Structure formats: structure tokens, C-alpha cells
Amino acid sequence: MADVIIVGAGPAGLTAGLYAARAGLSAVIYEKELPGGQAGRTDQVENYPGFPQGIGGPELCMAMAEQAQRAGARIEYAGVEEIDCAGRRVRTAQGWDSARQLILALGARPRTLGAAGEERLTGRGVSYCATCDGAFYRQKQVAVIGGGNTAGEEALYLANLGCHVLLVHRRDALRAEQAVAERVLREERIEKLWNSEVAAFEGERALEAMTLKDGRRVEVAAAFVAAGRLPETELVRGQLRLDEQGFILAGEDCRTELPGVFAAGDARRKRLRQIITAAADGAVAASQCL
């Protein structure tokens, strides 16, 4: 029996494995795909400390995986099909595995629009994180799609980078909190396209324009989809407390209500979801296992 089972090999899970192994604990990380999660699908990461010229997301995540393994953590490339939180065990195609502690680094995926060309141009102008990718498009015309807090905050962030921002929202008013909405409405660099929805993203090698459902074609260098995130918490639903969006309720110490069960990274309810905050969660969760 391992000391710690970690579900997910994104930045949170890999950092948890690194810190657990360095503390002398036996740690097993289960991952259904390649290391990195959403971070591993990001072409270029410019806001992770220590890389002033930026670093490729896959390169950064593979380095994290190598470091965790070098410290002694074991990565099992097997999809977890069932999680028994109370029993601190997981089931893969090879059967059940249990541990003394369980760290859930399940991650979250962006909510997509389902528009034509969206999948093909993701990472080539279509993005789900202005904080991650906005700096590539300083002084250019870009779009933010959505009407909630995230959309408003991302539009303001991009405007501060000197972008002309087209805020595309399917309603005639923002759903964001009043303070955010008022700032957006005052910002002259944010052009509001009310009652509008994206039908398609266009471009050969990179995004060039969007077509709206009313037939208008708008040229943009980038489009930031801010339709929310979907936590990958289906396997723990009914076992742990989740918020209304499905994120795991755990404190800053990453502890859930079940002894020996921790939540780290983007699946935990938190304000900022970035590689660095996921890694921080992983370190904190592992430290709680000692």
C-alpha cells in the first residue's frame, strides 16, 4: 500500500508527487493521458516564474513529470474509472489500488462554445485564458466571449494591454457583479456586441476572424472564450461537498471533509486557476500528508 495516491498528473498532481516523494512518502500518480492536463495543451507559457522568454506548456509539464519521478514518485498511465474517497482507493482497468492518503488533482476543462472551427483553432488564436495568452496580442483587436465575471475581468485585462476588445455577449446586459460590470461599461477600449453569438471561427493557420450568427464577420487576432470551466469531479460527486458548479469545497490547506482526502488544483473551488496556483496546491496537499 502506498502512502499517497494522487489522481491526475497536471501541475497540481505532479507537484504533489514531487513534494510527497521528497518527504520520504511513497507516491503513485494516476494519469489517463500525458502529463500536464490543460497546461500541457498550452503552446507557450509566459507567466510561470523563472522563464523570462516563456516556455512551451508540454515542455514545462514533461520537466515537472521528470522531476517528480526523479524524486521517487511513480506515474501510472492508467485512467481512473472509480474513486472511493472514504476508502482512499481508486479503480483502474487493472483493479483497485489503495493508499493511506488520497490527493485529488482532477483538473477542470474549459466550457467550449461548440462553434465551427473552434477546436481546430484552439491554441492558434482561440484561447480560454486571457491571463495566459493575452500578452501575445498587445495592441491588437481581440474578442472576449461571455458576460459573467470572468468575461468582464478578461476584457479589462486585455484592454490594459492596449487591445481593442470586442465583448461578445448573447444578452443585452452583463451578468457580472456590479463593480466589474461598471468598469467594463466605462472602459472605452471595450466595444460591446450585445445580443450576439459566435457561429464560426475562421482562419487557415491561425485565427483571422469570427462570423456571428447574424451574419456579421469581425476580424480579430484572438478570441478568448469565457464561458466558464467544468471541473472533472464526476467520480467524486455524492462523496464530497461540491459547490453549485461542481468544484470541490476544500480549504486553503486543501483538506476536504473526509480525513486523508485532499483536493488540489483547478478542481478545487478557488478564485485564480493558473499553473502556479495549481502547483502551490499540490505542495500544500502533499505537506498535509506527513
Image: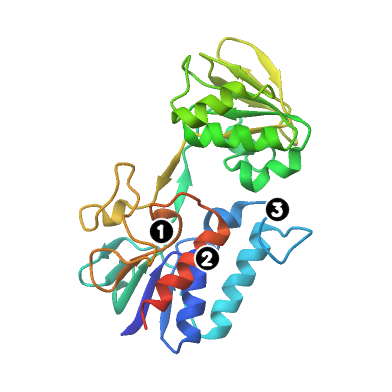
Residue 45 x %, y %: 68, 55
Is residue 9 something that shows in the picture?
A: no
Residue at x-position 28% and y-position 61%: 82
Q: Earlier in the sequence, mark 3 or mark 2?
A: 3
Tell me which amino acid carries mark 2.
Ala
Is 6 left or right of 196, judged from the image as shown? left
At x 65%, y 65%, the residue is 60
Q: Is residue 181 left or right of residue 201?
A: left
- Amino acid at circle 1: Leu
Considering only order in the chain, which callout, 2 or 1, is on the residue closer to the N terminus?
1
Q: Please tell me the numbered disc located at residue 44.
A: 3
Is residue 216 at all visible to an observer of this figure? yes
Give the quarter of the image for residue 236: bottom left
Amino acid residing under circle 3: Gln
Residue assigned mark 1: 106
Rendered image quadrant of residue 51: bottom right
How many residues crowd mark 1 within 10 Å: few (<14), some (14–19), many (20+)? many
